Image (cartoon, coloured by chain):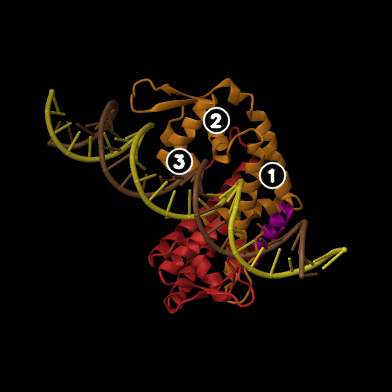
Chain colours: A red, B orange, C yellow, D brown
Amino acid sequence: MKSIAPGKGYLTGADEIVFLLEEVPRKLRKLFDASTAKFGLSRTQWRALGYIYRTPGLTQTELARHLEIERASVGHVIDQLEKAAFVERRAAVGNRRIWALHLLPKAITLLPSLRREADRIYDRVLSGLAKEQVSAFEKMLEIMSSNLED
Amino acid sequence: MKSIAPGKGYLTGADEIVFLLEEVPRKLRKLFDASTAKFGLSRTQWRALGYIYRTPGLTQTELARHLEIERASVGHVIDQLEKAAFVERRAAVGNRRIWALHLLPKAITLLPSLRREADRIYDRVLSGLAKEQVSAFEKMLEIMSSNLED
DNA sequence: GCTTTACTGTAAGATATATTACAGTATGGG
DNA sequence: CCCATACTGTAATATATCTTACAGTAAAGC
């Protein structure tokens, strides 16, 4: 369903920018969802695979921090990925509380394609912007992010 | 649970900016949630009130477009707001399919406080940025948004 | 006018995530 | 060594939202 930007009546100017700041990532999420769906994965599952790829042996708590979801939710995600043979929980040496997460071959063969999908989306969203613009944009995002720190 | 920014290993440069583009609005959502919770409202409920305020007599389908959620979900939101006596469904003249949404006094007295809360958050997120920076930022968001159109 | 098509809201069920409480395990201070 | 405390993953439950299907109503084409 197509969205409608806020009008100028009751709203402050800043409402406008916050609206866009919500809209752009939402559209990005939608594109990523479409890409990952081709592979039978959700965006969260795909992100999980990416982090496990980068740090094999990751624990669920660590993964939860990366994905910005709760440990309980990560448990579900890993359940799914394990059932689909993308991921394996291995007992960790010296600590019987935790699982060490590892990719299985089925996931590893998939990652390059997912990487290409992501890069295609990045090219698209940033097209028409100069390098300096993009880096200025990123710096501002960093400032905003730190403004909102705790 | 505290998040972790993506490292530089496996990830493209653009992953970084997309991460921030996700993180800033997430932090904003969190602040808005905290603000609206003081009034016993969810962020979506609060946004719904804002749109009904701006356009009394709005239909649920129109509201769904504004809120970027589905019609069925809007139905639930209005159920809640109606139960809490913030909103009223009134029969629309000349079209028996639709409801005209109207605020009740209880909601109207609340809106100024919510407005102040929002403005406080805006001041905070944009602090340290010059006016021209903010407008450049907004223009870039608009470009990105149109890059992602359909 | 009738019939087909489109629109509006709702119901039922699915999914993703959050919250809370907990059991099992580790760790650090005394 | 023992005890108190902290950490890890899971279960149960709650909530928000989506998807699909539908009933009622409106509008448009013939």
- Residue B51 showing in the rendered view: yes
The numbered mark, 1 or 2, whose residue comes first in the sequence reads 2
Please tell me the numbered disc located at residue B65.
3
Residue ID at (63%, 74%)? B8
Element carrying mark 3: helix
Badge 3 vs badge 2, beta-carbon distance below 8 Å: no
What's the magenta region? A135-150
- Amino acid residing under circle 2: Arg
Q: Nearer the viewer, residue A123 or B80?
A: B80
- Residue B55 showing in the rendered view: no
Left or right: where does residue D18 sit relative to residue B16?
Answer: left
Determine the chain carrying the residue at label 1. B
Left or right: where does residue A36 sit relative to residue A50?
Answer: left
- Amino acid residing under circle 1: Tyr
**Magenta-colored segment: predominant secondary structure:** helix
The Cα atoms of the two marked residues, 1 and 2, are separated by 20 Å
Q: Quadrant of residue A16?
A: top right
Please tell me the numbered disc located at residue B122.
1
Q: Residues within 10 Å of mark 1 (few under 14, many from 20)?
A: some
Q: Quadrant of residue A101?
A: bottom right
Q: Residues within 10 Å of mark 3 (few under 14, many from 20)?
A: some
| Residue A117 coordinates in the image, percent (x, y) | 45, 69
Q: Which residue is mark 2?
A: B54
Element carrying mark 2: helix
Residue ID at (38%, 65%)? A40
| Residue A34 coordinates in the image, percent (x, y) | 41, 61
Please tell me the numbered disc located at residue B59.
none
- Asked if B8 appears above or below C18 in the picture, the reply is below
